Amino acid sequence: MIARARAIAHGNAYTTYATLKKNAEFVCCENMAGDRTAAVSEDDLDDIWIQFKYAGENYIAKGKPVIRNLIAMEVSPTKEESKGWRLEQWKWFAHRFIEEMDKIEFKNKEGKVSSKQMDLAHSKWLAMLHHDAKSGIPHLHFMVSRFTVDGRINDTNLIGEKAVMAANSINKSMGWKQSREISEEHKAEIKNAIYDILRNMNRFDWNSFQRMIEKHGYSAELRRDTGGKIVGYTIKRGNSKYNASEIGRQLTASRIEATWKQLHKDMDAETAKRKDEDQKARVEYAERHHFVCEPVNPETKKEHFEFDRSFENDKELEHFTFDVSENIVNAMSSTFKALEDEFEFFLEEVMEVSLCVFFEIMSVPGGSGYSSGGCGGSNNDLPHRKKDDDDELLRAKRIARAVAKSCPRKVIRRGYGR
């Protein structure tokens, strides 16, 4: 669970957002006048805000105006921690968090109190349950008056630190992860997502970067200087915000494009290396099996294979011939096309490997396409039935899918750059 809190001056706008957001659910409230046990409507807003605003009327009357007169807090257990919770559990949780906040007091090195204990339990407060639109993470929004019902003011100095301490206290008692651990996990998750985005961008530009960030379930807020140049950015995940420098030094606004260039330089070098390795592997395969592949005959529309194979104990080679129909090639091609958005491969290479594997299977003694002997032979001499053709096409598709998925160049591809 993580939490944040601060005193704000725009309490009216925050209350409107927290209570009227689509699908927001009323959880509970305390010390509020009137019937506050059901969903909040637009007609209720003025009354709610007036209660918050004038709760400290006696305090303000003494000549001490308070600009930041509302405490805003967001508290978010993880999906796993709050799994299966009903409103009754969220109500208990809201009161528990208020209770923990009221326990905390800060003292400086000299022992002097630097932030007094608050008394939120005896202040007017309201809690609403939201579900993040992108991540679906549930979280509570608290609206709490700066003033207690008897006119005292809540000390909001270091209130952000108090929220973290309250969250960690509950985490410890519930056996949940601590805030720092959760924060590190979130930053690592965002870092991986950004590197994934950079790898899949054909060129770097901030508009595309923002769009891809949103597709990953986050949002990016860009900071510009007076000349319009982007000098920084933050990533928002649910209710948590992280500066680029917190996510990774190589991902700051001044370095991210250079990081993109280096990633693609490394990827190009790796691709060239793997292509060379693949070429060597194909040559070795051909030499080991002694096969010859002739191009498609425009008249017969068949691709002709000649294949020599020997086993360790055999002194003589077995010779095979095999003609692959256009239907088989088309079946494999359509399979590759369906997979090209998910896997990266060279079409010519996977087609050649797939045909070779198909030929190997069909040339097994007893197989439907087997033909052998010193004088050669061909499966063209065998009678064909529709079921046999259907079986061959299905086998061809399965082989093509297996070859594409086991391709050494397998890389998950998403979004921009395809």
Image: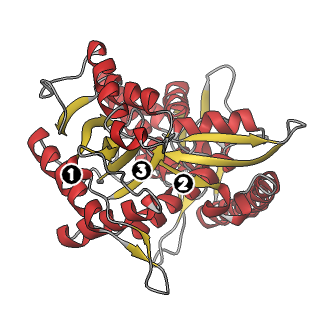
Give the foreground label among 2 and 3. Answer: 2
Residue tagged 2: 190
Marked residue nearer the N-terminal end (3 or 1):
1
The image shows residue 112 at horizontal and vertical percentages of: 44, 80
Q: Residues within 10 Å of mark 1 (few under 14, many from 20)?
A: some
Residue 82 in sight here: no
Which residue is depicted at the point 17% across and 37% down?
A: 28
Query: Disc 1 residue type?
Result: Ala
Q: Name the side, left or right, on which 24 lies relative to 377.
A: left
Give the foreground label among 2 and 1. Answer: 1
Query: Disc 3 residue type?
Result: Ile
**Separation of residues labelled 2 and 3 (CA atoms):** 46 Å
Which residue is depicted at the point 37% across and 66% down?
A: 116
Residue tagged 1: 121
Q: Which mark is residue 361?
A: 3
**Separation of residues labelled 3 and 1 (CA atoms):** 76 Å
Marked residue nearer the N-terminal end (2 or 3):
2
Marked residue nearer the N-terminal end (2 or 1):
1
